[in-house]
Image (spheres, helix red, strand yellow):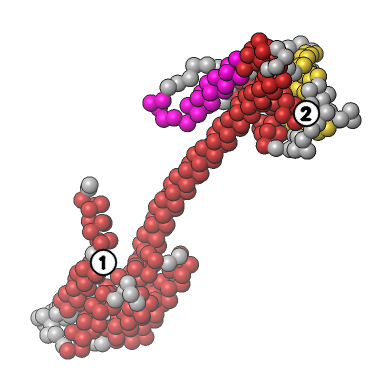
Amino acid sequence: MTATSAWSRWRTNHPRIVDVGLGVVVLAIAVGTQRIDLDGRGARDLTAGGVVLALVEFVAVVQRRKHPWAALVVAVAVSMVMIGAASLSNTGLGLSVIVCLFHIASENDRRRTAVTAVAVAAALATTSLLIGDRDKPLLDGIVLMSWPLLAAFAGAETYSRRAYLQSLVERAEQAERLREEEARHRVVEERMRIARDLHDVVAHHIALVNLQVGVASHLIDRDPHKAVAALRGVEQTSAAALDEIRATVGLLRGPDGDDSTEPAPGLRDLTELIGQFTGAGMTVAVRVSGEPRPLGPAVDLTAYRIVQEALSNAGRHALPGPVTVSLTYEGAVLTVVVENRGRAVSASAGSGFGLRGMRERAQALGGDITAGPDADGGFRVVAQLPVTSETWDEENR
């Protein structure tokens, strides 16, 4: 810590001591200058009136923080009395005015400071011209105008510097708040993404388990071997669900947690996904139109999750029926269509959190999704996802 900063901190923490010390200095100068020999006849004697005026100046300086305008008025009045008193020396005239005016200028805007400084300077200069020393009234008037103006200028610069430093502090605090808000926003977005992933994983595997258990219960009496195979499928599906949930929840761990090295699922895993549902008794056909192309990670994962959720909904909310998954690469758009021809048995089909999650995923990439019953009584999900180079750049920023 430098000596200047140490002094500034001490002065800020002990304002009353500073005020009294400054008042003592003003008092000493006011008393001392009254004894200065101006006429060559030896030092003057102190008068009671001079001592009283010096004490009034001391009080004005000490009280300037608590009553700034009253202190300035008192200081100006004392100076005007000293100008007109022939028995008093004017050598230390106006020191309390300078101190009070500097304080006011350092605490107020430039307009108020300018008006105050001009008024004080005009009052002192007019008093000097009317009742001051007749030998040099013009010179005294100029001096009496210059000191208040200089004090006001110095105080205004102090005010400007303090305001500038305050603005820097406020901007730094605002930037910190913005960083914290951005961090909180990112945390919320990440939690929402993980929540969607967990919903998709759990809903998908629960739907598969439900289908496989239904198949096993249907075949337990007629074909026990196939029922056992279905139950083994339940075991495999449950294990896969646990693995995916463990990998997703692992993202919430700290830096000491195990890092997952498995890539996020995508359309490359579509065959395995379809196989899980067909193994559970569903009939699923896949159609690909256009020229397949590499997709960005976000688009690839979103397309996979949409197909996964739509197939899970088909298993939960409809009677067995053929399901068609269509992928169409056309221009800069990938269109994903999942059509379920089974008859819906649940009024909540397509209206839960899964559909909302699919829509949020698509909209986050600038795409859109529609879902609802078709004319044949089935259910249809249509998603359009942009696969332009701009989307790729945005995903990998």
Is residue 202 highlighted in magenta?
A: no
Q: Amino acid at mark 1?
A: Pro
In this orientation, which residue lies closer to the viewer: 52 or 32? Answer: 52
Q: How many marks?
A: 2
Range shown magenta = 232-257
Secondary element under disc 2, as helix, strand or loop, is loop
Identity of the residue furthest to the bottom in this view:
48
Magenta: main secondary structure: helix
Percent x, y of residue 111: 48, 67
Q: Is residue 396 visible?
A: yes
Is residue 239 highlighted in magenta?
A: yes
Q: Quadrant of residue 293?
A: top right
Give the residue displayed 35% in from the left and 77% down from the top: 67
Q: Indicate whether 315 appears above or below 10.
A: above
Give the residue displayed 35% in from the left and 75% down from the top: 68
Q: Quadrant of residue 322?
A: top right
Give the residue displayed 75% in from the left and 38% down from the top: 348
Q: Indicate whether 339 appears above or below 83.
A: above
Percent x, y of residue 192: 58, 36
Frontmost of labels 1 and 2 is 2
Q: Is residue 337 visible?
A: no
Please name the residue that numbered disc 1 is placed on: 15
Percent x, y of residue 12: 27, 61
Q: Quadrant of residue 86?
A: bottom left
Identity of the residue furthest to the left in this view:
42
Secondary element under disc 1, as helix, strand or loop, is helix
Q: Amino acid at mark 2?
A: Ala
Is residue 287 shown left or right of residue 353?
A: right
Please name the residue that numbered disc 2 is placed on: 318
Distance from Cα at disc 1 to Cα at disc 2: 81 Å
In this orientation, which residue lies closer to the viewer: 339 or 212? Answer: 212
